[in-house]
Amino acid sequence: MIASVVLTSCGSGGMESDAQKMCDFTCESQELSKEMIANPTDLSLSSKAFEIGNALNAFVKEMEVKYDEDERKEFALYFLKCDCLQSY
C-alpha cells in the first residue's frame, strides 16, 4: 500500500487527491499506533512504522516542492477533512 501511495502521488492528481493520500498515511499511522500499543513486543509493527514514516517523509518533501506556501494552506484545508481526524 505504501508504495502505491507514493507512486501514485507522482501522477497528475490534484490537490484534493494529494490531501487524501496524506489522510491515508495519517489513518494508517493511527491504526498502527493502536496495534503497537496492544502488541508492544511485536517487532514487525516497529518495522512497518519505520516504513510508513519513510514513505510519509518522502511524500511530504514532494508536496513541499509541488505546492507553494499559499497552495499549502489550501492543501491543509482539504487535509483537515480527513475522516480519521474527525474522530478527535
Image (cartoon, grey):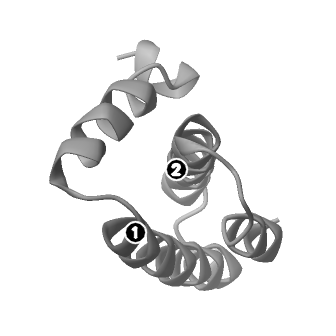
The one nearer the camera, 74 or 21, is: 74
| Residue 57 in which image quadrant | bottom left
Instruction: Residue at 61% x, 44% y: name it.
Output: 14
Say left or right for 59 vs 17.
left
Nearest the viewer among 74 and 84 is 74
Residue at 72% across, 59% down: 12
- As drawn, the residue found furthest toward the left would be 69
Which residue is painted at 76% across and 75% down in the image? 7
The numbered disc on residue 22 is 2
Residue located 82% across and 65% down the image: 1
Percent from the top left, x then y, of residue 75? 37, 39
Q: Position of residue 70 (x, y in %)?
A: 18, 44
Q: CA distance from mark 2 to mark 1?
A: 8 Å
Query: Of the residues under marks 2 and 1, which one precedes in the sequence?
Result: 2
- Drawn side of residue 57 relative to residue 42, left or right: left
User: What's under tag 2, amino acid-wise?
Assistant: Met
Circle 1 residues within 10 Å: few <14, some 14–19, many ≥20: few
Local packing at callout 2 (Cα closer than 10 Å; few below 14, some 14-19, many 20+) is many
Viewer-proximal residue among 76 and 86: 76
Quadrant of the image containing the C terminus: top left
- The secondary structure type at the circle numbered 2 is helix
Residue 80 percent location from the top left of the image: 37, 25
Tag of residue 60: 1
Relative to 33, residue 6 above or below: below
- The reply to whether discs 2 and 1 touch (Cβ–Cβ < 8 Å) is yes
Left or right of 26? Residue 75 is left
Horizontal and vertical percent for residue 20? 60, 39
Q: Amino acid at mark 1?
A: Val
